[in-house]
Image (cartoon, rainbow, N blue to C red):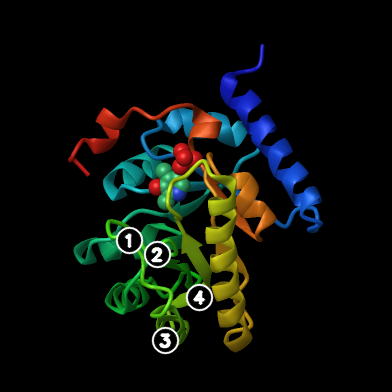
Amino acid sequence: MTSSIANNVSRVLDEIAADTATAGRPVGSVTLLAVSKTRSADEVREAHACGLTRFGENYLQEALDKMQLLTDLPLEWHFIGPIQSNKTRPIAEHFDWVHSVERLKIAQRLSDQRPADLAPLNICLQVNISREQSKSGCTPEEAPALAREIAALPGLCLRGLMVIPEATDDDARQHAAFAAARALFEQLQAELPTLDTLSMGMSGDLDAAILEGATIVRIGTALFGPRNYAAAANPTH
Ligand SMILES: *Cc1c(COP(=O)(O)O)cnc(C)c1O
């Protein structure tokens, strides 16, 4: 019998393919990032055996511990959680992508601390697209100037935007938020034509995200099942 992770991976990949086709977008234009926060190294290993190679983590220490157990696999690691300025060095040293950059100071530190023998760190600027008080991300108004400054940093390669819209089951609201992100992304692309990444869409809203132009969807629950929040909240990270 196939495992539940294997079943989930094939179901999510089918859904991405169907949404991509519905949107009239090219096959393969949406990348699946498996969000493995709170999951064990063995679960990551199992997902890799199902063909997944890109994994997203929110908590630095948890991620570093997991990476150490998985050095035999050719995985691409994406940091997607809030970044404290005293934690930028290990992020710059161990990750391939960071989706959660929201201020210049953090970007400068990541650039300065990126080891010279590694390719520039791929960056998405996080934008608070639904303008929620409690949410991370720069405002849409701040995004153009910040993008320009980040694009000039030598240790980084600015790839695009990341958004986490307000959580809602309302399809029209999901579409409106993702459409706003896409409009901002296209505005930035006019000035910075190398931008190619719109990181948006999670387990609950990936259909709307793909229809509105997501190029990376970040999926946790739909691949691995519900998270154990007690473990996630454990402050050892
Ligand atoms: C946890 C998380 C996800 C995945 O969420 P699911 O609802 O489990 O798919 C995606 N993006 C970010 C930034 C996250 O923190």
Q: Secondary structure at mark 1?
A: loop
User: Quarter of the image containing the C terminus?
Assistant: top left
Of the residues under marks 4 and 3, which one precedes in the sequence? 3
Vertical comparison of 184 with 219: above or below: below
Q: The residue under label 1 is which amino acid type?
A: Ser
Which part of the image, by quadrant, shows the N terminus? top right
- On residue 145, which mark appears? 3
- N-term-proximal mark, 1 vs 2: 2
Q: Callout 3: few (<14), some (14-19), or many (20+) C-alpha neighbours within 10 Å?
A: few
Give the amino acid at mark 4: Cys
Q: Residue at x 39, y 57 (%)?
A: 94
Nearer to us: label 4 or label 2: 2
Quote the CA–CA distance across marks 4 and 2.
Answer: 21 Å
Residue 57 appears in view = no
Give the residue pinned by disc 2: 128
Disc 1 to disc 2, C-alpha distance:
6 Å
